Image: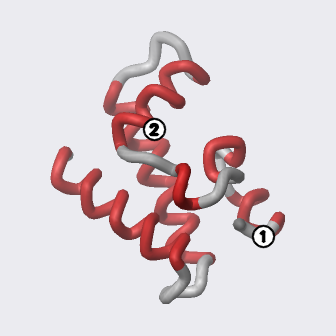
Amino acid sequence: MLSNDIIDRLDYPVYWSRPHTEWGSIVDWDMFYIDQMPGSTLRDSHQALARDLNTLIDNLLTKSRECQKAKSLQALLNTQV
């Protein structure tokens, strides 16, 4: 679980407050984002995801499972851009 300090830095803390094993995939994020921001584009979703992933990676311990999951999602996102 993420510390409150890290959660407070995120744009979408509700998504990241769950255990990292429940963060899912890029598609899961897109469904969450579109539900939160109706009428938004896929590009908007991916930009928001990129911001939150950068925040996570910058603030988590490099070897933590949460950081590894964030890096994995970031790598997947970079292949879709």
Q: Is residue 53 above or below residue 37?
A: below
Label 1 CA crowd tier, 10 Å (few <14, some 14–19, many 20+): few
Which residue is more in the foreground, 29 or 46? 29
Residue at the spot of label 1: 3
Q: Residue furthest right?
A: 4
Q: CA distance from mark 1 to mark 2?
A: 21 Å
Q: Is residue 77 above or below residue 60?
A: above
Q: Position of residue 53 (x, y in %)?
A: 48, 59
Q: Quadrant of residue 28?
A: top left
Q: Position of residue 10 (x, y in %)?
A: 66, 54
Q: Is residue 79 above or below residue 36?
A: below
Report the side of 44 relative to 33 (left or right): left
Q: Residue furthest front?
A: 21
Residue at the spot of label 2: 29
Label 2 CA crowd tier, 10 Å (few <14, some 14–19, many 20+): some
Labels 1 and 2 touching (C-beta < 8 A): no
Indicate which disc, 1 or 2, sits on the residue closer to the N terminus.
Answer: 1
What's the residue at 54%, 50% (across, down)?
22
Q: Amino acid at mark 2?
A: Trp
Mark identifier at residue 27: none
Which residue is more in the foreground, 59 or 76? 76
Q: Quadrant of residue 19?
A: bottom right
What's the residue at 71%, 67% (across, down)?
2
Q: Amino acid at mark 1?
A: Ser
The number of discs equals 2
